[in-house]
Amino acid sequence: MIYLVLGSNLGDRAWNLEQAKALLAESLHTDMLCSDILETEAVGFDGPPFLNQAVCFESDITPEALLDLCQAVEAQLGRPAHAAEFDAAGRRIYHDRTIDIDILTFNGLEIHTDRLDIPHPQLWERPYVQELLNDITI
C-alpha cells in the first residue's frame, strides 16, 4: 500500500483536498481509502491552520513517477514550484500552501535520493500524521 498525507492552509482548504484526491485518483486509475479530515496548527512557521487528510491506495506507479504526479497536482492547484529552503542554522523554512502532498510510505520500500525520502523523514515527528494513518489502517 502507498500512503500519502495531504494538507492545505490557503483558500478553500476542504475543496483543495477534494480536488487533489480527485486528480490523483484520476491519474492513478485507482480508488483511495481516506482518513477523516483533521485541522492542525501550522508546524515550523506562523500561518493559518491546515486541514490534513491521509489517503492510501495500490498502484503500479514508481515512487519517482508518484513524486512527479504529486508535484504536478500541487502545481495544478496553485502551489508554486518549490525546493526545500533552509535558514542559516540549517532549519527547514516552511510556507503557507494551497496544497501539500507528501509520500509517507510506499509498499514498505526505503528510498533515499536527492529528490525523495521514503518513509517520509517527518513521519514519526508529527503526531497528527499517526492519528490520520490510524484512521485508515486496513
Image: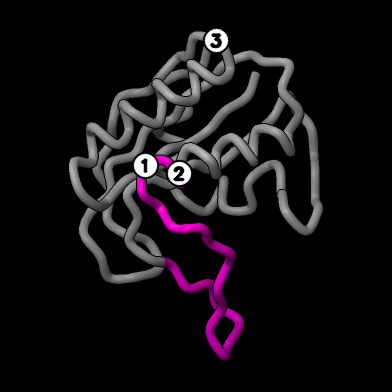
Q: Is residue 17 above or below residue 87?
A: above
- Is most of the magenta stretch helix, strand or loop? loop
Q: Which image quadrant is residue 41 in?
A: bottom left
Q: Identify the residue position indicated by label 2 in the image.
A: 74
Q: Is residue 5 visible?
A: yes
Q: Is residue 28 left or right of residue 117?
A: left
Q: Identify the residue position indicated by label 3 in the image.
A: 30
Image x and y of residue 50, in percent: 28, 49
Determine the CA span between mark 2 and mark 3: 19 Å
Within the magenta stretch, is there residue 108? no
Q: Identify the residue position indicated by label 1 in the image.
A: 77
Determine the CA span between mark 3 and mark 1: 20 Å
CB of mark 1 within 8 Å of CB of mark 2? yes
Residue 119 or 65: which is nearer the viewer?
A: 65
- What range of the chain is rendered magenta? 75-94
Secondary element type, mark 1: loop
Q: Tag 3 or tag 2, which sits nearer the N-term?
A: 3
Q: Is residue 81 above or below residue 68?
A: below
Image x and y of residue 115, in percent: 73, 54
